[in-house]
Image (cartoon, helix red, strand yellow):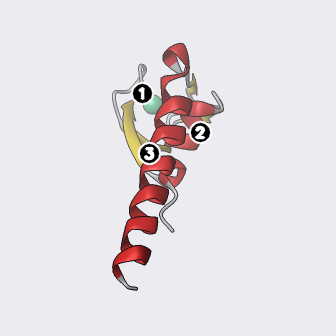
């Protein structure tokens, strides 16, 4: 079972422009991540879109999984 919330996205540190990898779940939870330069970055889930993506995609994968199960019959 694929868990989409474990998928990662890259963001850029506003301070040093280094790219930081965060998981979709961290974005959905709006956690604060810390860059190597010491800068804290508060993740924001714009209009709850990360949460929605996780929900929608997990549902899609579940449907897909069921489709494969049915094919195996
Ligand atoms: Zn940085």
As measured in the structure, the alpha-carbon distance from the residue carrying label 3 to the one carrying label 1 is 27 Å
> Label 3: how many residues lie within 10 Å, few (<14), some (14-19) or many (20+)?
some
Element class at badge 3: helix
Q: Is residue 53 above or below residue 6?
A: above
Q: Would you identify the image quadrant in which residue 10 lies?
A: top left
Which residue is at the front of the view, 18 or 45? 45
Asked whether the residues under the numbered discs 2 and 3 touch, taking CB atoms below 8 Å apart as contact, a structural biologist would say no
Which residue is at the front of the view, 12 or 9? 9
Given this view, does label 2 or label 1 mark the residue nearer the observer? 2
- Image quadrant of ligand 1 equals top left
As measured in the structure, the alpha-carbon distance from the residue carrying label 2 to the one carrying label 3 is 16 Å
Q: Residue at x 55, y 21 (%)?
A: 48
Which residue is labeled 3 in the image? 57
Q: Earlier in the sequence, mark 2 or mark 1?
A: 1
Which residue is at the front of the view, 24 or 43? 24
Q: Is mark 1 within 8 Å of ligand 1?
A: yes
Q: Is residue 11 above or below residue 63?
A: above
Left or right position of 67 against 46: left
Q: Residue furthest bottom?
A: 73
Q: Residue at x 44, y 57 (%)?
A: 63
Residue 36 appears in the figure: no
Residue 26 image label: 2
Q: Earlier in the sequence, mark 2 or mark 3?
A: 2
As measured in the structure, the alpha-carbon distance from the residue carrying label 2 to the one carrying label 1 is 15 Å
Residue 19 appears in the figure: yes
Residue 29 image offset from top left, x and y in percent:
66, 32
Asked whether the residues under the numbered discs 2 and 1 touch, taking CB atoms below 8 Å apart as contact, a structural biologist would say no
Which residue is at the front of the view, 54 or 14? 54
Which residue is labeled 1 in the image? 13
Element class at badge 1: loop
> Label 2: how many residues lie within 10 Å, few (<14), some (14-19) or many (20+)?
many
Q: Would you identify the image quadrant in which residue 34 lies?
A: top right
């Amino acid at each position: 079972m694929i868990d989409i919330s474990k998928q990662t996205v890259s963001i850029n540190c506003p301070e040093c422009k280094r790219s930081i990898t965060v998981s979709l779940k961290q974005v959905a939870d709006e956690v604060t991540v810390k860059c190597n330069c010491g800068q804290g970055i508060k993740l924001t889930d714009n209009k709850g879109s990360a949460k929605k993506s996780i929900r929608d995609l997990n549902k899609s994968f579940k449907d897909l999984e069921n489709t494969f199960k049915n094919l195996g019959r």
